């Protein structure tokens, strides 16, 4: 029933009008004149791709209907049809029924068809993702069973299972990349930082792997987020969109929990991180706050990466100062100190190892560019626009032009430059 649309409205003329619109596009439409009838149809017919419900109906209203419908068919894309500009009802529907879109009466036929076609495509993509997750779960279980039947020594079995788990985690991360490349790259960078920080804190090897995997997979719930939200920069989201995106993060732990063969410590760590994130993002050092070490490590690494890869990225020192200012409140001071030492040590080692004929080679962000620096690679924007070619010597005028262009087409990656060591 991947093309089935359900329409629920107590007015027969509206049911007929909407039914004609979608029948012309070859879509299957089922109708109901009340919320109870709509729920009964859902129970009998199984999954429905899209449901459009009127807001105000006698008996069961649209908010209650969509809330109960979500319990029966959680993957269905839900629309609310209303002729009333009632913001309270809108927020209530978002919070209780997770409404995907509101349609106001009177509607525009063509706009409505575009919205519903987009919802159908979103449903099909999500269905394919769910089937892939199920196949991965089955494959991983088979790998575990194979390991158990090989008759190897216990130590060898554990090594094989661990190796398979790493591959499995990377495969899940690749699924996130198919949905949102930017989020996947962010998770990989956070996982790398978390692994290095855990190692520097002398965490045991097994726990380091657990923290790495949890950091890599903590955003896997992004698969269920609407495409238009993923296309926006975080600082451009409305409060309602931010709340919806934060709520989708919970899917990470729900998805991992369904894969029974997955490493339990990883699932528990992600759950601990997500619960702390949704309760206000507090990862401080109080022993009674219930936040585990791995979640504290991931929180600091994630914050640093977001600060240094946002639309207007902060420099290394600015990002560290921002995180330090929240130490003791949002972050564990001991973790912040260790992270600061790790980042500064890595920067110093990079600078010491990269000297070319009296010139130092370094990676800087846009706001770290200085007159006299030489580009070691072409300078390209996020959208692929070439701004300056390799070997360009920067001047104040060029830096100003690049900075102005950045406001139109951001430069999110660090820039490889060389400069005279005497000018440091």
Image (tube, rainbow, N blue to C red):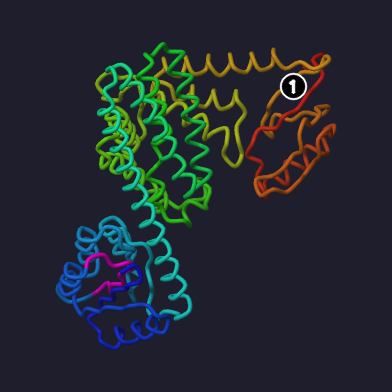
State the residue position of label 1: 361
User: Residue at (37%, 83%) from the top-left corner?
Assistant: 23
User: Residue at (69%, 48%) from the top-left corner?
Assistant: 384
Give residue 415's position: percent from left, percent from top. 70, 32
Q: Secondary structure at mark 1?
A: strand
Give residue 243's position: percent from left, percent from top. 37, 49
Give residue 212's position: percent from left, percent from top. 42, 26
Residue 382 located left or right of residue 270: right
Residue 299, quarter of picture: top left
Residue 18, quarter of picture: bottom left
Decide which of 173, 32 is in the foreground and name it: 173
Residue extent of the magenta highlight: 46-56
Position of 409 relative to 146 (above/below)? below
User: Residue at (74%, 21%) from the top-left corner?
Assistant: 361
Q: Is residue 49 magenta?
A: yes
Q: Is residue 305 magenta?
A: no
Residue 210, quarter of picture: top left
Give residue 237's position: percent from left, percent from top. 48, 51
């Amino acid at each position: 029933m991947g093309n089935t649309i359900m329409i629920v409205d107590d007015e027969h003329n509206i049911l007929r009008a909407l039914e004609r619109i979608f029948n012309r596009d070859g879509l299957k439409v089922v109708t109901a004149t009340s919320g109870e009838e709509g729920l009964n149809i859902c129970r009998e017919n199984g999954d429905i791709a899209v449901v459009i419900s009127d807001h105000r109906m006698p008996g069961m209203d649209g908010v209650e209907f969509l809330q109960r419908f979500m319990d029966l068919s959680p993957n269905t894309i839900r629309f609310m049809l209303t002729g009333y500009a009632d913001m309270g009802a809108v927020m209530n529907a978002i919070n209780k029924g997770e409404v995907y879109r509101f349609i106001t009466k009177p509607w525009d036929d063509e706009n409505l068809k575009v919205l519903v076609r987009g919802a159908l495509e979103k449903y099909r993509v999500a269905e394919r993702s769910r089937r892939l997750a199920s196949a991965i779960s089955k494959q991983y279980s088979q790998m575990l069973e194979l390991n158990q039947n090989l008759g190897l020594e216990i130590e060898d079995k554990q090594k094989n299972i661990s190796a398979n788990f790493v591959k499995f985690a990377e495969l899940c991360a690749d699924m996130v990349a198919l949905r949102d490349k930017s989020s996947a790259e962010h998770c990989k960078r956070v996982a790398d930082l978390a692994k290095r920080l855990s190692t520097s804190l002398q965490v045991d090897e097994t726990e380091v792997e657990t923290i790495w995997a949890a950091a890599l997979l903590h955003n896997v719930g992004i698969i269920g987020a609407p495409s238009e939200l993923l296309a926006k920069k975080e600082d451009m989201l409305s409060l309602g969109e931010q709340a919806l995106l934060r709520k989708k993060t919970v899917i990470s732990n729900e998805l991992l929990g369904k894969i029974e063969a997955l490493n339990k410590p990883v699932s528990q760590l992600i759950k601990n991180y997500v619960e702390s994130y949704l309760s206000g993002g507090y990862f401080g050092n109080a022993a009674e706050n219930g936040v585990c070490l791995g979640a504290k490590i991931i929180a600091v690494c994630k914050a640093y990466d977001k600060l240094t890869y946002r639309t207007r990225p902060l420099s290394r020192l600015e990002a560290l100062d921002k995180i330090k200012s929240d130490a003791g409140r949002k972050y564990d001071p001991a973790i912040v100190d260790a992270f600061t030492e790790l980042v500064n040590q890595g920067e110093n080692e990079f600078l010491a190892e990269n000297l070319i004929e009296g010139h130092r080679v370094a990676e800087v962000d846009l706001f770290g560019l200085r007159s006299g620096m030489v580009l070691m690679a072409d300078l390209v924007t996020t959208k692929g626009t070439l701004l300056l070619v390799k070997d360009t010597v920067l001047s104040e005028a060029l830096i100003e032009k690049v900075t102005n262009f950045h406001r139109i087409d951001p430069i999110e990656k660090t820039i490889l430059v060389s400069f005279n060591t005497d000018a440091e």
